[in-house]
Amino acid sequence: MLLTTVVSWVVHRTKAPGRGLLDLLAFTPIVIPGLVLGLALAFVYLRVPLPVYGTLLILLLSYCTRYLPYGMRYSSSAMAQMAPELEESAQVSGASWFQTFRRVLLPLMSNGATAGWIYILVVSFRELSSTILLYSPGKEVLAVLIWEQFGNGQFTTLAALGVCMILILVVLVTAAYRFGARFGLQND
């Protein structure tokens, strides 16, 4: 979500050439099926001499790529609702870009960023299509474990893992909601 807030700032607040193209590129992964994305990432990182394949980092890269459009929409809608005069007044008062971003924009975007984070968290927990091509033994995520239990015919273990996944999501969403309520996010 932090990456998407910076990209949405570039798209909405700057006059940089190519900002429309940046927005289009950030939205492009939504049209790529998960299996194709996983295969493309495997193809790229098997040929590039970076030690990424077979680690959890490749799963993180896959999730960041796959869910970038969703985070971008949440961040862009939050950014579009703020007047640019708030940033200008902070800069006139002597704040740097980073101070303005951290003390003015991020608190005002916190509703959209928290909503985007919760949505991406919930949806990424069940991501299987790109993960099934990129995981390595010993580094399985919960969706892959559930898939393996289904393939092995162990339906009781599968059901228990499904309940555990739901409980984990309930705890994480409740914690995010309380964190947001504690730091000034209200239901509107």
Image: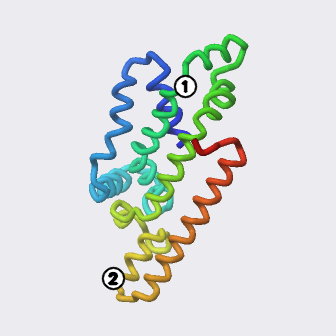
Q: Position of residue 118 (x, y in %)?
A: 53, 53
Q: Position of residue 21 (x, y in %)?
A: 34, 27
Give left or right: position of 28 versus 171.
Answer: left
Q: Position of residue 10 (x, y in %)?
A: 48, 25
Nearer the observer, 56 or 100: 100
Residue drawn at x 65%, y 24% as measured from the top left: 100
Residue drawn at x 46%, y 24% as measured from the top left: 12
Residue drawn at x 68%, y 11% as measured from the top left: 92
Give the labeled residue for mark 2: 151
Identify the residue at the far front of this view.
Answer: 188
**Mark 2 or mark 1, which has the lower sequence index?**
1
Nearer the observer, 10 or 40: 10
Does 131 appear above or below 84? below
Give left or right: position of 186 versus 31.
Answer: right
Give the labeled residue for mark 1: 82
Few, some or many C-alpha atoms within 10 Å of disc 2 (few <14, some 14-19, many ≥20)? few
The residues bearing labels 2 and 1 have C-alpha atoms spaced at a distance of: 49 Å
Instruction: Please say if the residues under marks 2 and 1 sit with CB atoms less than 8 Å apart.
Output: no
